[in-house]
Image (cartoon, rainbow, N blue to C red):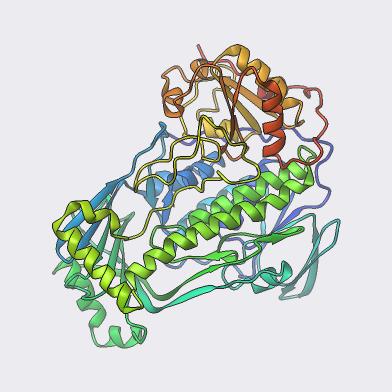
Amino acid sequence: MPEAPVPPPAPPADTGAAPEPVLVLGAGPVGQTAALLLARWGVPVTIVDARPERAAAGSKAIVQQRDVLDVWDTLGAGAVAEEGLTWDTARTFYRDRELFSVRLRDRGASPLPPFVNLSQSRTERILDERIAAAGLRVRWSHEVTAIDQDASGVRVRCATPTGDVELRGSYAVACLGPHGRVAREAVGADFGGASFDDRFLICDIRADLPGWERERRFYFDPRWNPGRQILIHPCPDSVFRIDWQVPPDFDLEREEAEGGLDRRIRQIIGDRPYEIVWHSLYRFHTRVADPMGAGRVLLAGDCAHLVAPFGARGLNSGVHDAENAAWKLAFALKGWADPRLVDTYAAERLAAARDNAEITGATMRFLVPRTPEEHAHRSSVLESAASDPRAASRVDSGRLFEAFYYTDSALTTPCAGRPFPGRPPRGEPPVPCPGVLVPDVPLSLAERPETTRLRTLAREGVTVLATSARGAQAARAAARRATPAPVSALVLADADPTGALAAALDARPGEVWLLRPDAHIAAVCDEDDTAAVTAAVHTCLGGGAPAAARAPQPGEEQDGGVLPASG
């Protein structure tokens, strides 16, 4: 993979910058991402964590999806993709027969792989390096014990080894994990859902398993775990993570003492030498906090939602929580959008969390059927798929993470000519339309050689893509009537001479595509309808009273104009 580009400079400072920092509560990957994104926007940040230091134990969340690697790459953390083990095929078996495999496609031309596997501890260390480079630090041993807010800010009380301290901030982003009750209580959130009786034994082993290095393997009812499932993921350094579904009364200590764990491993890998790197026992839950924010306190990551890991929808969704929160806080604090934009965080990410819960809940009901009817359905589907490949689409071994489609969001302007056709088949990217994350492509910009990808540019403000120079100029002017935020405009044929983006979008003459600061498509308009462009920008920034437009600041014309292609 090419070397990660140097992160572009933060958007120009504005006199409306927050005098108080945003408090990021929790320094796991979601909190780290939120802090880095806020800092990139020029927003002051304070990070706290209850732990005395960074712990490095086990794989934990290992599967990082392309759209999340994309966020981290923009922050200069491309090492996650570079060090992670790339895989692009997901295989599903029933007993000893392969039912189907899914190869993961990209509608654009991203340089990033569809998925990599890298231990959460290593991902955290990479993000820590970026935090240090950004001039931030984590206040360790700060356990959040109370959160209060008023109309002007947030007060967070922390217990520390030297006594209680109180921190004041403009907003708080709570990334406190599943035990973050203090944050959920602060916003009055219910954390309802379901727990599953069966447990899952997770074991990281180092072994040589030829042919298994670039694919995820999922087994229903294998001879190594009859009546239940096994999931195998490759990781760097010849490490493989194996997840066994085990009964509710499974005793790991007894299993180890009686040699059962060794037998389990050898049933899969045979008589090869191996080393146990880490193991643990988990019980999985499906829970969603409602609301996911209130006033000046936003919930993110496991503090806001818990899902089973089949489909890798936990950490990946949490990173998108962080991005959604960061750009909205930045735009509100800088005066680039109405402060009510922040309120849309809870609505958009609650919809995403519920979608993940619905998908993973259906998977768990298929993996761990609870009623005779569910058992019969599962058996019928698996037996049918074993003899008829056409039945494979009904087998649920976990739909892999995909960025949420904000098609029903209040920030999205629908387009009659670009309707959302619904969720695509497994492994397929969605059709680009308002609400969907824009496909990524390489860019070639003469005055911006450091900006090599579309999504990196999109994360600097509001972005307009047009099929003509006239359309780009008119749309940029129309966008600037709605916001003083940085606005960039691209002519597709100039910035993307290969035609990859035009093809990915199926762009039509006279169209203008409007991108939000998180690279989601906000609207598709006619280049001659500049009033519609202004209205769409106004809508995607939360509505309310439009912020007053301003003249470009010194040195800003390059970031806010129609960007030229490189020679």
Q: Report x, y in % for residue 63.
A: 41, 55
Q: Is residue 175 left or right of residue 480?
A: left
Q: Report x, y in % for residue 517.
A: 63, 37
User: Which one is in front, 206 or 443?
Assistant: 443
Asked which quadrant contains residue 361, the reply is bottom left
User: Which one is in front, 550 or 196?
Assistant: 196
The answer to whether residue 123 shows anywhere in this view is: yes
The answer to whether residue 132 shows anywhere in this view is: no
Q: Is residue 116 above or below residue 142?
A: above
Q: Quadrant of the N terminus?
A: top left
Residue at horizontal 81 percent and vertical 26 percent from the top:
550
Q: Is residue 524 above or below residue 270?
A: above
Q: Report x, y in % for residue 462.
A: 65, 32
Q: Is residue 485 left or right of residue 4?
A: right
Residue at horizontal 40 percent and vertical 48 percent from the top:
83
Residue at horizontal 77 percent and vertical 52 percent from the top:
21
Q: Is residue 54 left or right of residue 166?
A: left
